[in-house]
Amino acid sequence: MMDTPTPPNLDTRMPASSPAGQGASHAADAPALLDVRNLSVSFGGKEVVSGLSFSIAAGEKVALVGESGSGKTVSALSLLRLLQDAQVSGNAIFQGPQGAVDLLALSDAGLRSVRGSDISMIFQEPMTALNPLFTVGDQIAEVLELKLGLDKSAARQRCVELLAATGIPEPERRATAFAHQLSGGQRQRAMIAMALACRPRLLLADEPTTALDVTLRGQILDLLADLQRQHGMAVLMITHDLNLVRRFADRVLVMENGLLVEQGPVSKVFEKPQHAYTRQLIDSKPVRDVLEPPDQGKQPPLLQADNLRISYRTPLPGLRGWFGHGEFVAVKAASFAIAPATTLGVIGESGSGKSTLALAALGLLPFIGKLSINEKYWTGKHNIDKELRKLIQVVFQDPFSSLSPRLTVEEIVGEGLQVHQPELSKAERRQRVELALTEVGLGETLFPGLLTRYPHEFSGGQRQRLAIARALIVQPRLLILDEPTSALDVTIQKQVLELLQRLQKEHGLSYLLITHDVDVIRAMAHQVLVMKDGMVLESGPTAQVLDQPKHPYTAALAQAAVENSLENQGT
Amino acid sequence: MSSASLSPSQRAWQRFRRNRLGYWSLLIFCTLFILSLGAELISNDKPLLARYQGQWYFPIAQNVPETEFGGDFQTPTDYLDPFIQKQFQQADNFAWYPINPYHHSTINYFAKEPNPSGPSSDNWLGTDDRGRDVAARLLYGFRISVLFALALTCIGVLLGVLTGALQGFFGGKTDLWFQRFIEIWGSMPELYLLIIFSAMFDPSVALLLILLSLFGWMGLSDYVRAEFLRNRQLDYVRAARAMGLSNWQIIWRHILPNSLTPVVTFLPFRMSAAILALTSLDFLGLGVPPGTPSLGELLAQGKNNIDAWWISLSTFGVLVVSLLLLTFMGDALRDALDPRKADR
């Protein structure tokens, strides 16, 4: 765990303890720092943002919330005119150091002087936002030299101070590191240091924590809040995560399909949402609705794993690589069991080995140890394994890569039948496909000509339903769900989880549910397995593990979720 | 919602059609190619249909001795002979000649000027240095070039896709050894091998096809391999594996259709490269056997008879037009298959 050290006071321009954010939102006497009027953005004649108007006062924390495709990122990018081939209209009056300017009508040179020094930006994925060919220090120093005219040694020293202020340990050493040598959290801290290098008046943060692991999100958010207070700058945070909004923002703007549907102080919007869409967003936390298995322990487990060890070969550097290879152990000594009609949740961060575990359970990766499904074992022989494949099916995370783009819905969903029940006639197969599709809530009434459609015609949530139908058609007993909802918007996520809960009740399915989201685990799982760095830290019934965690890591995971729900009750 | 759903390839075709330059290039090229397939009906020294003393003849399909038309010898009729032509002009005899009354091998013995003779009403594009009609040779040469290019492209694509698919799908050791083999094979001096082989064997189109195919598959193989490596770890392939599909089914149904974009994109460019390869080998005299009509041989003649501008200029024109059409098609195809260009 990384504690945020109290950063040295970097700011000389502003008093350190200005109560920013409190009174700022109703400071009617001074003009707003940024006043956006009637902003519209369209691509090739298609309008994605229409008539957006809002203002941000100096030192205010504003959150822009919406689902993917609602136009929130496009709106922010268009303020700095970072969008190519977009037609932008409207005004964005910014109170710069030299007086008010309209960002949308500024000359290119004028805009360049605003970018980075008065308004700066943090992106979602720091790995791609940092240049891989320069050290982090060079990139921060470049901003300082360009914008503030510092000389090389001064820039370097300032850069180390900035990195220290973001709580990166050993800032002198990290300044000489490349982006890939830092961890995800450190990279985002470096991005923040770079964005704050010239003490901007406004910071645009585009999903700054989405690419990070759960336990890091809170830390980065606290860091942003700390720095915001010190610098007295305004922050426009773009996010889809309402928990972040509650924790961070003073005021919230809700966008749907390019329109601003609601805005107001956070507490008011969350307490009394006016717009139906806002209510839907707030109610999107998944609800637990599963049957408790009647008598655990009596039934033999459907899947039993003992001491699983899964490793990958890695190349060795230098001459040794010619004669051998290294080994990366992705999963060490994992043991678990799944009873019929129950869900085992596996929770962990990226790189904890949870997806590897899923692939091994599917018999797609070689492993050492014992793994039996319905008292049968993977053999590696295609004809023998075919029987097992009927019992165990999978739904993957990314709904866009999990369906072959060149096959029709009928071909995709019906494929399992061709393999496992080749004796079915074409008409029988079509009937079964239609049945499976109805079961996941897709039907002819919703989509005329559903069977002959191609995946690109469906949204993310619908594609995930197709993937579930494909898995269900062979009537499996165990479904492996590898982050089934984490690529989906919150409202869609809730619908898909409800579908999975219903299917479990109706068919007595067992799930192996892999996720990083404590809320999903709470809603779905009977048993839970906590993984970190390939190790199983803790396992047991969900309520017990999450409410009385034995391991500090589990406690940290549960803590993040508890904080949110406590605040939920508080507001 | 429209009633019919379009598959990705149908959408790509629609994008292709929207590119007018490429689409018209395709139409023109196909028309030229189909016309050249019927070259015997367009440019031939035998009449399509003849009537002599109340009897019907199909000289293009049957071999008629000269004695039938009042000649002296039992030899096949030379229909360009002024005597024979005079016979057909009598009474109600007639002979219906093709538009260009010369075959690519016909030597015009009755030319008014010495060979090579310039363009005239007899020989529209003149004759070459042996008195053969340049227009006829261009038509037949174009046909051979395109047929050769098609065959070479087909073989190259088949070999390239097969080897690329094997390497990309199985990866690991298979991939490693195949890559080393390609490195060794690719470093062989192709041109010198061709020269040596053309000295060892009788030159023929088939030999050329085999020799060029031996080296032509490697570039494509690398692209297909890369596509397979990318696609095989996508979730839909994992899902197909989890479903219990065999390797062959996974390759055929799932990976191959999604890996063909570079193959299709390169088709016109491979065609034009093949045409160029055949032309340059013929130009060097390493290509098709003597007497075969070919663009490269015509270019060589143009070089040897620099005064006979009609030979080099017309051949050059045909080459440029066909390569240009192929390039336009290729550009349009590349745009149509570019995943970054969404259809508007």
Image (cartoon, rainbow, N blue to C red):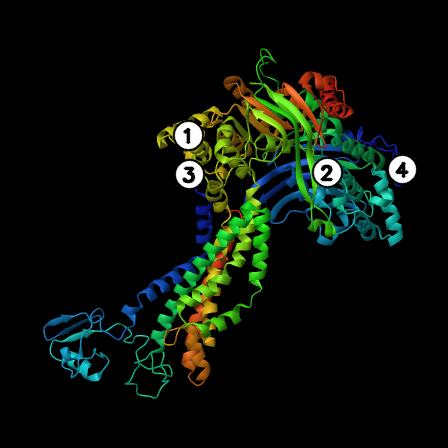
Q: Is residue B319 above or below residue A17?
A: below
Picture quarter with the N terminus of chain A: top right
Who's the residue at 59% across and 59% down the image?
Answer: B183
- Nearer the observer, A327 or B5: A327
| Residue under numbered circle 1 | A421
Amino acid type shown at disc 3? Ser
Residue position marked by numbered label 3 in the rendering: B2
| Residue A168 image offset from top left, x and y in percent | 83, 39
Cα separation between marks 3 and 4: 62 Å
Residue under pointer 2: A205
Q: Secondary structure at mark 2?
A: strand
Mark 1 in CB contact with mark 4 (< 8 angstroms): no
- Residue A116, horizontal then vertical, whole percent: 77, 46
- Asked where in the image residue A60 lies, by quadrant, the reply is top right
Determine the chain carrying the residue at label 1: A
Chain of residue at mark 4? A
The quarter of the displayed image where residue A6 is located: top right
Q: Does dot 3 land on a helix, a strand or a loop?
A: loop
Q: Give the numbered dot on residue A9.
A: 4
| Mark 1 on the same chain as mark 3 | no
- Toward the top, the furthest residue is A295
User: Is disc 3 in the same subunit as disc 2?
Assistant: no
Is tag 2's residue or tag 1's residue first in the polypeptide sequence? 2
Q: CA distance from mark 1 to mark 4?
A: 70 Å
The mark nearer the N terminus, 4 or 2, is 4
Q: Chain of mark 3?
A: B
Quick check: B106 above or below A182? below
- Residue B261 at x, y percent in the picture: 50, 51
Element carrying mark 1: loop
Q: Nearer the viewer, residue B216 or A555?
A: B216
Q: CA distance from mark 2 to mark 1?
A: 52 Å
Q: Does dot 4 land on a helix, a strand or a loop? A: loop
